[in-house]
Image: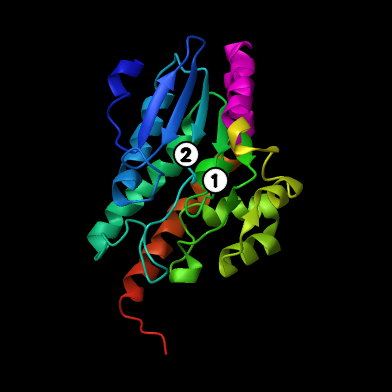
Amino acid sequence: MALSDYEDRFSCAALSRTDDGVLTVRLHTKGGPFRWNGRAHGELGDLWAAIGGDRENRVVVITGTGDFFVDFPEPARMIDPLVGGVVNATQWDHAISEGLRLIAGLLDIEVPVIAAVNGPAIVHSELAVLADVVLAADTAYFVDAGHCTVGLVPGDGMQIIWPLLLGPNRGRYFLLTGERIDAHEAKQLGIVGEVLAPDRLMERALDLAHNLAARNPVTMRNTRSVFKRALKRAVTEDLHYGLALEALAGLSGREFSPR
């Protein structure tokens, strides 16, 4: 697959690649900050598959647009991962299929992935923290606003990655309470590698990307492979289960009226 085959296919991402194989993926919504929605939920798995199938990609840099890495447009209430689009078991089954491809496809990319977290990651922060190198602007923070605090099980990968990053107890606390972890604390906790001023973020990300792209591609692909093995095992064992329980909570939430 060539870049020309897929660069204009996805409404949620603008793609560009340098001559040395550094592919930049800029997440966006209609050219502005990336706001999570059902279309993105469906597209991203296909986007990762296209990127992974293009052997000309040597390093992938993922970033957002404007002040947010990923935002959520809905108010804090009982919601679902497709922003109001899931109402029955058949539709949830479709959402589970998309959710599996969303995470597995990202991990299936065979080359190093760098996340340049340009601002808050409100939902689906795994898009950033599953990268091999995570850089954050000093305006960024991480929070899970789309699950426990609004009535859903954090079963779409958040229950896997955050307890691995934070440790079991802090990870559960983070997901249950909706805690915000800002960029500087995230660096202290080992979630991000560097914190930079927003106007320096992409420059640094691209510097690192070009450095990696200049190395032996066989070494880089296999280094990526050894880094992600433990994550892929965890995803294979627990992601489908977690998504199914998230669906159950989404269906039951429409019947539940808090006192």
Q: Mark 2 — residue?
A: 64
Whether residue 1 appears in this view of the structure is no
Q: Is residue 194 above or below residue 257?
A: above
The residue range painted magenta reads 201-228
**Dot 2: what SS?**
loop
Q: Position of residue 106 (x, y in %)?
A: 47, 36
- Quarter of the image where one finds residue 90: bottom left
Q: Position of residue 69 (x, y in %)?
A: 49, 44
Going by the numbered disc 2, the residue's amino acid type is: Gly
Whether residue 7 appears in this view of the structure is yes
Measure the C-alpha gap from mark 2 to mark 1: 8 Å
Q: Mark 1 — residue?
A: 119
Q: Does the segment drawn in magenta span residue 86?
A: no
Mark 1 is surrounded, within 10 Å at the Cα level, by few (under 14), some (14 to 19) or many (20 or more) other residues, namely many
The foreground one among 127 and 1 is: 127
Looking at the image, which residue is at 34% across and 34% down?
46
User: Looking at the image, do the residues carrying marks 2 and 1 touch, with CB atoms under 8 Å apart?
Assistant: yes
Going by the numbered disc 1, the residue's amino acid type is: Gly
Q: Position of residue 109 (x, y in %)?
A: 48, 29
Looking at the image, which residue is at 31% across and 75% down?
254
